[in-house]
Image: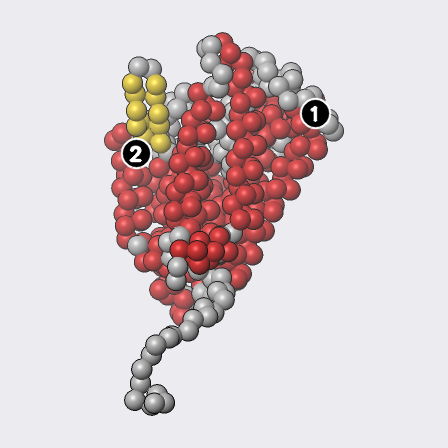
Amino acid sequence: MNNKSSIKYALKETDFILFLLCLFTTAFGVLMVHSATRNEAIADGTIIGRDCLVMICAASVGIIACIIISFLDYDAIVRLWPLAGGVCFLLLLILFPFGEGAPGREEARCWLRIINVGGLVVRFQPSELAKIGFLITFTAHIEAVKDNINSLKNILLLLVHAIVPIGIIIITDDLGSAMVFAFIFVGMMFVSGVQLRYFAVAIGGAVAFVPLIWTKFLASFHKYRILAIYYPSSLSEDVYEKYIYQQQRGVNAIGSGQFWGDGLFKGTYTQSATGVPVNESDMVFTVVGEELGFVGAAGFLAVMVFIIVRIVAVGKMSRNLSGSLLCFGTAFMIGSQTIINIGMCLKLFPCIGITLPFLSAGGSSNLCIYFAIGIVMSVYRFNCNRDPINFRLTHLSTPFSEA
């Protein structure tokens, strides 16, 4: 095959719809983060704030990695599950001696410090990469037991496979990521054909363990955040105002945007030093709601739905279970993070600290999510129907040739 044909097939087999949707959403996210950090950048005498710059750099590296991964056969990626799982598991274990919290979350051990030079601190969150590793290893596990997946032994082993990383992440105080892992696990189990009776038992067990989780595993501030949303009358006024402050400011910001928004760079809360805390990251949706209004927020949600639907469509076109699981797992990851984050911003869910895919600042999330998109694009590429190659042999001599 000549170079021209190779380029033709490379372009034809690229899922430009998904890729361009992701690029557009990331560009939109950069704009929102820039708006949220614009005043800080001006105060520092720079054009772009540090959080926005980190987001651009991480997303750029992620996009390049996404393109490279899309040319790798996803079946080969799944076969590398020992490497993917081993690296991610090691990074999670390293958090115990070396993990640290970011400003405002000093009690957590979710991040590893990568660079600390001249006041410049760059951290990496291993749980973001571990989500991709889990997609790969769990796909390999299900693929290995798919013919007898509903046996009790295999169900228990799959459960252990999920509990190990979830447990480590909970211990490091990253409940948001732990919840995303749980959604990925449940979604992939459902797609793989696990019988509903196991889900019923799991739900019953989860309900039974709620009192134990509440008393033994949740810190006081976790309980206060939950009570502030669902049972505010149980808290004193001072405690309630302390733990609902961030979300209440977020709801106020979204509400002030009304239908059309206050205008880009004109949001009262967004552009105020005393506005919504962490509005460049966990609460970035409040920037969209305030400055672009209901129209901007609805438009963003529509694009996210298109991305998720496209990923599901790629999963359905896969000729084998591995491709479907990788795609559906990615869809559950992006969908669960989106629902939890926006629910948190709208004061529907307690504040647990979780990024909004493609939109929130943060190098780890913006880098690693493109790894998952690259895998989905690989599933698309290696399940495309290629046109038959037309070729002709000339000057071929055989004993049956005419004289």
- In the rendered image, which residue does mark 2 sit on? 95
- In the rendered image, which residue does mark 1 sit on? 261
Secondary structure under tag 1 reads loop
Neighbours of disc 1 within 10 Å: few (<14), some (14-19), many (20+): many
Image point (27%, 35%), residue name? 94
Amino acid type indicated by mark 1: Gly
Q: Label 1 vs label 2: CA separation?
A: 41 Å
Quadrant of the snapshot with the N terminus: bottom left
Image coordinates of residue 281 in percent, x first then y, are 50, 27
Identify whether 157 is placed above or below 358. Answer: below
Neighbours of disc 2 within 10 Å: few (<14), some (14-19), many (20+): many
The residue closer to the viewer here, 162 or 10, is 10
Identify whether 249 is placed above or below 208. Answer: above
Quadrant of the snapshot with the C terminus: bottom left
Amino acid type indicated by mark 2: Leu
Image coordinates of residue 41 in percent, x first then y, are 49, 15
Image coordinates of residue 360 in percent, x first then y, are 51, 31
Secondary structure under tag 2 reads helix
- Asked if residue 176 lies left or right of residue 97, the reply is right
Instruction: Work out whether mark 1 precedes mark 2 in sequence or the reverse, and give the earlier one.
Output: 2
Image point (39%, 59%), residue name? 2
- Asked if residue 238 lies left or right of residue 378, the reply is right
Image point (36%, 47%), residue name? 133
Image point (35%, 28%), residue name? 123
Identify whether 53 is placed above or below 273. Answer: below
* Residue 305 found in image quarter: top right
In the image, farthest residue toward the front: 403
Q: Is residue 138 visible?
A: no
Q: Marks 1 and 2: which is nearer the front?
A: 1
Q: Is residue 354 visible?
A: yes
